[in-house]
Image (cartoon, rainbow, N blue to C red):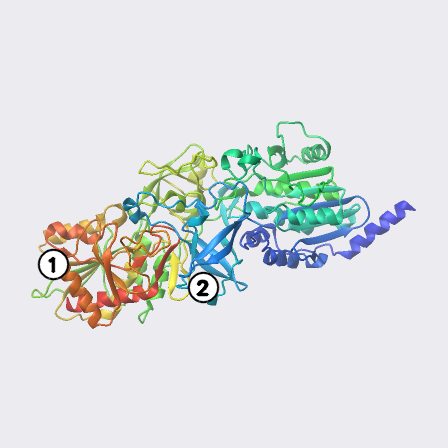
């Protein structure tokens, strides 16, 4: 009779769910899950996506956002869970001038460099149910030589989020309120060798694994009750997990999620020096988290180890913190048959985190065998990563494009200093009117001339094409790429984040590695020209690198995208000097083909970030021809202290209040009478203008030795040389207009 009842239960379970219940693929699941932010307590959007995928199983979602699927009935009751949440932030206040203040979730715990790696990065804020763009404020490298004690990016007191608002009221009108969640912007990238990278991928692989388990599930093979759950608030004392344990009282528990660092002393809780690292690396197969990875496994863990062996699955132990702390207000005991399964993650809990898809396949296969017995396990499809295409060049427009459209196109085109500006140069040329026939000199400078009247002043306007980045210097024996810097930047803005290697056959995603010792409490970021940068694209030796088509001399960047912020502001990387380039393009359209009785030259120069090399070549050539310009309008960034982090002692030009006469910088001092002349010209043409002192140099200084006068122009920029630079597009409009007026009448 018992056998018949058991068979009947299996038959009913089989009839309750169709054979194929979950559409899609593992990679599609993982891609969507990692791209859905889920800060602790704010997992509802991700929970809804998971529940939608599993609709055929009629999942239950509780008020905490735990998603629960139950298959079968009776004993034993087995529970398999994965966490949904990731570390992030919640808005804790809004300043009078519109910046957001933050508190981290979880509020404690060991997360080395977490705050620093958010500095000057693009982020998303969930405002009124919609994710809006923002950028975390960061220090501008051009202003730091004048600052003896800069604020630490590790300190939450120095974290501000710029959404473009100019007041608390404007921020609230954008939908932002205290308690809104915030997380770093993310994309999912396929690296070589079947490796996948994205922020929070270590917090989401378990969700994708459990969806895959249910996709493969044959309900008739389930013995007893199987509960598959996706739990909330794991990072905040495992509250979702503890609720399910108390409610369901399972006999077995398998937790599928990242390993977490063990705090070895309560007195040092939260200090990176008090935590252990992980011994296993991606490619190790399935990893089981234990208190002592050197001890022999026993009980349930040993059974799973044996099952892995029977299925030829690599299985290793590694140190991990307990799954759940002591419950507040009482005690709660996990089932005696409890294990923590994971895969190794590289650079855990950083934006550069990555996993090996082959490990995920092993983990999915092990769980499939555990749930429904040994057999031929399904496989996760792991394709060969194809290079990404470079952004398409624009087609030449028939009418003048808008300034912001020009800027967006140039921002999303890559071109690192030192001979890698070709795509930017071609994009600029394609954005010019059809009558414009610019020339390209031997240094890659793009040059457009009007007129040549001998009785008029020779005027040259210059903006630089290049952006900061890196170049592949050498391929190391382990397949990593050693880089040479091309322009200066704060290491924390780039290390520990995704990277693009631009080769002859396309873009190869990878990650910029963090320096050795990054997890230690005494870690200091390297500074100076000897800083070593390495990028990992997933290759293991030089032959694999060569097969990818990567070679020494290829250039490397951090991915970038143009983001609109509140009002007229925008955020991106490489506004320096794509704003200047866009302003020159706009001015070409405004000036037209027949610039009567003038002698004007526009130059889009190369290699400015390495030492004004392109401009120096133009200056030398024009001087040799006896045509050195009398006036050079060098159009470049006015690095501004219009930021909550910078001293207002100098460089105070306000975003949205017009272009800036860059009267004094590190390379030039504009004659004061010319500053006044330019400001009067702006006033007479109703163009908003500012003036001031800032750091850095400009291309115009390359012409000084040949008798030219450098009248430097700019626009105010926050957080220079970072992935989260911020501008106001009204300043671009003002800049384009003053260039046009000066070209016509100077």
Residue 185 visible in the current orientation = no
Query: Which residue corresponds to the image point at 62% horizontal and 36% vertical from the top-left?
Result: 289
Determine which of the numbered discs, if any, sits on residue 507 in the image: none
Secondary-structure class at tag 2 = helix
Comparing marks 2 and 1, which lies closer to the viewer? Answer: 2
Residue 167 visible in the current orientation = yes
Q: Position of residue 625 (x, y in %)?
A: 10, 54
Question: Residue at the top extreme?
Answer: 295
Q: Position of residue 381 (x, y in %)?
A: 59, 47
Q: Nearer the viewer, residue 197 or 178?
A: 178
Q: Position of residue 620 (x, y in %)?
A: 14, 50
Counting other residues with Cα less than 10 Å from the Cα at mark 1, is it few (<14), some (14-19), or many (20 or more)?
some
Secondary-structure class at tag 1 = loop
Question: Residue at the left extreme?
Answer: 455
Q: Report the residue marked by disc 2.
A: 171
Q: Nearer the viewer, residue 188 or 685?
A: 685
**In 3D space, how far apart are the residues under numbered discs 2 and 1 (Cα atoms)?**
47 Å
Q: Report the residue marked by disc 1.
A: 630
Q: Earlier in the sequence, mark 2 or mark 1?
A: 2
Relative to 6, say whether 318 is above or below.
above
Relative to 217, say whether 516 is above or below.
above
Question: In the picture, residue 413 is in which quadrant?
Answer: bottom left
Left or right of 438, for residue 620:
left
């Amino acid at each position: 009779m018992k056998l018949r009842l058991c068979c009947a239960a299996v038959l009913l379970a089989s009839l309750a769910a169709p054979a194929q219940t979950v559409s899609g693929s593992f990679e599609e699941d993982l891609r969507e899950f990692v791209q859905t932010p889920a800060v602790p307590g704010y997992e509802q959007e991700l929970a809804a996506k998971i529940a939608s995928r599993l609709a055929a199983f009629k999942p239950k979602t509780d008020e905490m956002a735990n998603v629960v699927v139950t298959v079968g009935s009776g004993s034993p009751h087995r529970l398999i869970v994965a966490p949904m949440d990731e570390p992030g932030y919640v808005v804790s206040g809004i300043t009078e001038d519109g910046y957001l203040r933050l508190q981290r979730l979880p509020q404690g715990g060991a997360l080395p460099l977490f705050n620093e790696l958010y500095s000057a990065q693009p982020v998303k804020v969930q405002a009124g149910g919609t994710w809006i763009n923002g950028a975390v404020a960061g220090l501008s490298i051009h202003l730091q030589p004048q600052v003896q004690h800069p604020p630490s990016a590790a300190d939450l007191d120095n974290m501000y989020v710029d959404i473009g608002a100019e007041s608390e009221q404007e921020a609230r009108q954008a939908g932002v309120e205290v308690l809104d969640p915030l997380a770093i912007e993310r994309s999912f990238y396929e690296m070589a060798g079947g490796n996948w990278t994205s922020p929070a991928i270590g917090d989401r692989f378990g969700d994708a694994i459990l969806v895959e388990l249910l996709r493969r599930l044959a309900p008739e093979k389930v013995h007893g009750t199987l509960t598959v759950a996706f739990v909330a608030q794991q990072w905040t004392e495992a509250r979702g997990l503890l609720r399910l344990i108390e409610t369901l009282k399972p006999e077995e528990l398998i937790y599928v999620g990242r390993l977490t660092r063990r705090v070895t002393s309560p007195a040092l809780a939260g200090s990176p020096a008090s935590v252990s690292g992980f011994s296993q690396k991606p490619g190790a197969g399935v990893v089981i988290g234990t208190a002592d990875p050197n001890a022999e496994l026993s009980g349930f863990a040993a059974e799973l180890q044996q099952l892995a062996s029977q299925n030829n699955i690599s299985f290793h132990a590694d140190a991990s913190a307990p799954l759940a702390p002591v419950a507040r207000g009482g005690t709660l005991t996990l089932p005696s048959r409890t294990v923590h399964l994971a895969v190794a993650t590289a650079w855990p809990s950083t934006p550069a985190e990555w996993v090996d898809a082959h490990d995920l396949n092993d983990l999915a296969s092990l769980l499939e065998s555990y749930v429904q017995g040994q057999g031929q396990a399904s496989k996760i499809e792991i394709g060969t990563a194809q290079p990404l295409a470079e952004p398409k060049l624009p087609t030449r427009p028939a009418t003048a494009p808008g300034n912001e459209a020009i800027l967006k196109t140039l921002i999303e085109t890559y071109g690192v200093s030192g001979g890698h500006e070709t795509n930017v140069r071609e994009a600029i040329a394609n954005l010019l009117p059809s009558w414009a026939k610019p020339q390209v000199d031997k240094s890659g400078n793009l040059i457009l001339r009007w007129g040549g009247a001998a009785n008029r002043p020779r005027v040259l306007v210059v903006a630089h094409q290049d952006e900061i980045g890196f170049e592949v210097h050498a391929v190391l024996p382990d397949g990593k790429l050693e880089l040479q810097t091309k322009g200066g930047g704060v290491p924390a803005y780039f290390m520990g984040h995704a990277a693009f290697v631009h080769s002859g056959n396309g873009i190869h995603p990878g990650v910029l590695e963090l320096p050795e010792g990054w997890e230690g409490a005494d870690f200091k970021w390297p500074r100076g020209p000897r800083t070593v940068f390495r990028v990992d694209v997933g290759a293991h030796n030089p032959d694999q690198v060569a097969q990818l088509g990567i070679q020494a001399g290829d250039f490397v960047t951090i991915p970038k995208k143009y983001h609109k912020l509140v009002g007229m502001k925008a955020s991106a990387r490489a506004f320096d000097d794509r704003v200047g380039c866009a302003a020159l393009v706009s001015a070409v359209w405004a000036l037209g083909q027949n610039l009567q009785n003038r002698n004007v030259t526009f130059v889009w120069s190369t290699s400015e970030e390495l030492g004004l090399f392109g401009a120096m070549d133009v200056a030398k050539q024009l001087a040799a021809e006896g045509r050195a310009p009398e006036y050079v309008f060098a159009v470049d960034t006015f690095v501004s202290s219009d930021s909550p982090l910078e001293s207002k002692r100098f460089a105070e030009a306000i975003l949205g209040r017009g272009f800036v006469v860059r009267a004094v910088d590190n390379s030039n001092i504009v004659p004061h009478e010319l500053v006044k002349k330019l400001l009067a010209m702006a006033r007479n043409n109703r163009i908003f203008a500012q003036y001031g002192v800032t750091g850095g140099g400009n291309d115009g200084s390359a012409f000084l030795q040949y008798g030219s006068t450098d009248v430097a122009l700019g626009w105010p920029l926050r957080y220079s040389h970072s992935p989260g630079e911020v501008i106001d597009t009204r300043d671009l409009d003002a800049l384009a207009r003053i260039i046009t007026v000066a070209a016509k009448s100077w």
